[in-house]
Amino acid sequence: MTDIIIGIDAGTSVIKSIAFDLQGNQLDSATVKNEYALLDGGGAEQSLQQTWDKTAHTLRALSEKIDDLPDRVAAVAVTGQGDGTWLIDKHGEAVNNALLWLDARAAGIAETISASASNRRRFELTGTGLNACQQGPQLRWLKQHRAEAFSNASYAFHCKDWLYFKLTGDIATDPSEGIFSFGDFRTRAYSPEVIDSLGLQAHRNLLPEMIEGTQVTGSLHADAARACGLRHGTPVVLGYVDVVCTALGSGLYATAGERGCSIVGSTGMHMKLVREAEHINLNEDCTGYTMCMPVPGVWAQMQSNMSATLNIDWLLDLITSLLGDFDADISRAQVLAQLDNWVGSAAPAGLIYQPYISEAGERGPFIDTNARAGFVGLSTHHRIAEVSRAVFEGLAMAARDCYLAMGSLPAEITLSGGASRSQQLMNIISAGIEANVQTITREEAGAAGAAMMAAVAIGHYGTMDDCVSQWVDPLMDDLIKPQRELVAAYRELYPAYAGAHRAMQPVWRTLADMRTLADRTLADRHL
């Protein structure tokens, strides 16, 4: 009896394999940490072989937890971290470590393309702004700086494509990543015009065929079956990119109407469901993403903050390191538990915090690799409570910034990621974007979204609507309505927040130039 679907979600630092029954109930899970290297000059790389080995490990570990798992698996579906470049040669071997979405080394290339006369047309076709983490600029960077690896490459994968290849031996990518990088969102096909605008027309052969995971299944080949402890021939589904699968599993796709979804995790992804291509808002700044949903004629329009809860991580690390310097025996978990109390005790809108803590800068709703975090309005009476609240409010203002860049604030959103574990943060985000907020009780939305695609692919559900009605709708919590007094405060705060990041851009550029000069001086001293 085949009564289980496994969803694999291969994140940057954690890989998960989750077992669901055919009705969408989570049965068990196996998780393993993955590692990546941060390199000088803004590099971020990960081993392809290590990522596959760890994925196979999670599947073997799941077999140890669930009786007769190999014979019960109806399908395996895989999703994973987005953007980045995972190159393989003609033998299917890695030619280079993968460049991750965190990698900023192609920033100059992205800026040059974005400033070109053809960029507006590229944006109108893809519906997606260009930044350093995407495969187009990264391929150009690899051609310039890793010439031997680039010349040996036969295909350019994303993370999930690599894992699908290792599971099935099939060369493929999906419409979500293929189209926002190289295609036309209206036709759901590669666009020669886009590829040409990226300067990659001579390397079109690197791009795999796009397949629709709700309609096409691969088959687990013998070597992968042995490595994973599963049955040879098990159907395998290539899911959409993790952010789309997470949105699907979190409730962005409703059987009727349009809603928003914010995934507030390490990064912040803010999405609006769009059912008509002409309703996609192509802003003047050429920013954001437009990604296909695994439903015909439906898209998710997105704006993404480079850093979301990474700002909270920074705050927690700062506090615990300071306490540690004075031998205070307080753990990071204890500080995290206190954070909501501090935030709740502080008055709203007392400070502005710009949450651009990532060394890769910001990508939504504006693109600036030099952007950095900062407080505006600090004075002697501000304490840890006010600073903590400002960090939370900065995330809400960033979400509002992103939704407005897509045209308007949504009336209702689903919220997932780390934000859903903090009542204070949920209330602040709800008021910041003036929307009713709903969370889902499902913990592993990304793996669930991939598994939902598999449930349709194997024919257990006739349509995605049928699947959503059983896998998602019953798990939605009650709506949280925005608090009026907070809405008024954040309406007044937002223009100052947006004005601050516009005014800071020349300052960020100067600081970046100073960092570059300091690095060169240090390098000269070592010669």
Image (tube, rainbow, N blue to C red):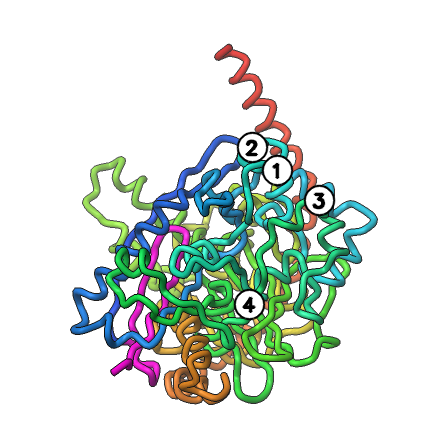
Choose between 5 and 303: the one closer to the eye: 5
Q: Is residue 512 left or right of residue 198?
A: left
User: In the structure shown, which secondary structural element does the residue marked by tag 4 occupy?
Assistant: loop
Q: Nearer the viewer, mark 2 or mark 3?
A: 3
Q: Residues within 10 Å of mark 2 (few under 14, many from 20)?
A: some
Q: Residues within 10 Å of mark 3 (few under 14, many from 20)?
A: few
For label 1, the residue is 141
Do labels 4 and 2 touch, CB within 8 Å?
no
| Magenta residues, dominant SS class | strand
Q: Quarter-wise, where is residue 302 in the image?
A: bottom right
Task: Please say if the residues under marks 3 and 4 sit with CB atoms less than 8 Å apart.
Answer: no
Residue type at mark 3: give it. Ala
Q: Amino acid at mark 2?
A: Arg
The residue where tag 3 is placed is 202
Q: Which residues are magenta?
A: 1-26
The spot of residue 446 in percent (x, y) is 42, 68
Q: CA distance from mark 3 to mark 1?
A: 15 Å
Lateral position of residue 159 relative to residue 31, left or right? right
Q: Which residue matches tag 4?
A: 211
| Nearer to us: label 1 or label 4 | 4
